[in-house]
């Protein structure tokens, strides 16, 4: 947000920036209430970070609204139309087509601005202190931040006019599931993006996914905090902007 950038340039103080971002969120809420005085749209908006943190298969309106079960679907589309959020739809069979297999009832929501996402993460306190931002930037915050990195990737892809898609499927004889965080159409094939909170770790979902659609998969990209340096992010931007022919982190598939 330009206001937040200006606040940082003028004061070099993260708490000041956070205050500006809270004012922006407050303006959003006022606009939401003009559409929906009940506050349900605001509740949907505020619930995004917590639902991503739980790593759910899809966004749950019931969790966001709690006991307020009556909900008009039009309000959800009003939220989408506000451009303050980014819907990411589950493609049920990416071997065919991301668009044709879009499940309109299964989606995740991201914020269109990752800076505001950080503020919503700590909205329970009057102000997010400099110490929190310092720990966040130095990777010393004792929290799993995979969902924050996911939001960053969603914003990056959306900035390149990409529709957002993901894919999940159940593991055999298990209550757990596999997940591909983001899928991108690339000519007649697709590319898969994995976002991880830590280092390299395991890539079970990517490996299984590759076995299933080997003939239609062009590229695999793993995005994690150990590779989020300026050069990698710049190259990734170029990659997404044009074509995903180069693998910035390749995974050997047995």
Image (cartoon, grey):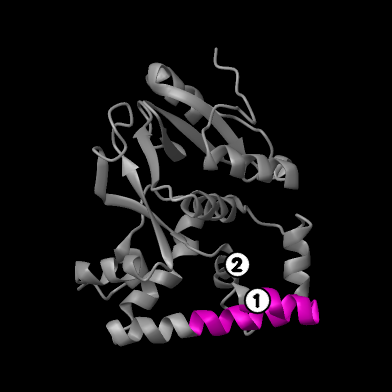
| Residue 157 position (above or below residue 51) | above
| Magenta residues (range) | 3-26
| Residue 161 position (above or below residue 171) | below
Is 131 placed left or right of 190 in the picture? right
Does residue 125 show up? no
User: Quick one: which residue is furthest to the top in this view?
Assistant: 254
Disc 2 + disc 1, Cβ < 8 Å: yes
Residue drawn at (31%, 87%) of the image: 34
Is 211 placed left or right of 238 in the picture? left
Magenta-colored stretch includes residue 10: yes
Number of numbered discs visible in the structure rendering:
2
| N-terminal-most mark, 2 or 1 | 1
Where residue 38 sits: x, y (%)? 29, 85
Where residue 227 sits: x, y (%)? 71, 40
Q: Mark 1 points at which residue?
A: 4
Is 81 placed left or right of 149 in the picture? left
Q: Mark 2 points at which residue?
A: 115
User: Quick one: which residue is furthest to the front in this view?
Assistant: 242
């Amino acid at each position: 947000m330009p206001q937040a950038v200006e606040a940082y340039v003028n004061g070099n103080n993260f708490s000041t920036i956070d205050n500006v971002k809270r004012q922006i969120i407050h303006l959003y809420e006022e606009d939401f209430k003009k559409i929906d005085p009940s506050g349900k749209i605001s509740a949907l908006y505020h619930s995004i970070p917590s639902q991503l943190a739980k790593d759910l298969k899809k966004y749950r309106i019931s969790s966001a609204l709690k006991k307020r079960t009556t909900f008009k679907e039009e309000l959800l589309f009003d939220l989408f139309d506000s451009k303050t959020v980014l819907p990411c739809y589950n493609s049920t069979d990416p071997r065919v087509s991301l668009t044709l297999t879009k499940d309109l009832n299964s989606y995740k929501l991201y914020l269109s601005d990752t800076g505001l996402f950080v503020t919503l993460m700590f909205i329970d306190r009057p102000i997010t202190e400099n110490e929190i931002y310092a720990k966040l930037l130095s990777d010393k915050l004792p929290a799993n931040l995979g969902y924050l990195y996911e939001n960053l990737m969603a914003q990056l892809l959306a900035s390149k006019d990409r529709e957002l898609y993901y894919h999940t499927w159940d593991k055999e004889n298990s209550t757990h599931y596999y997940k591909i965080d983001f899928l991108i159409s690339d000519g007649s094939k697709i590319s898969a993006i994995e976002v991880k909170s830590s280092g390299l770790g395991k890539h079970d979902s990517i490996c299984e996914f590759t076995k299933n659609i080997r003939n239609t998969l062009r590229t695999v990209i793993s995005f994690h905090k150990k590779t989020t340096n300026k050069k990698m992010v710049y190259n990734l931007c170029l990659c997404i902007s044009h074509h995903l022919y180069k693998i910035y982190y390749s995974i050997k598939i047995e």
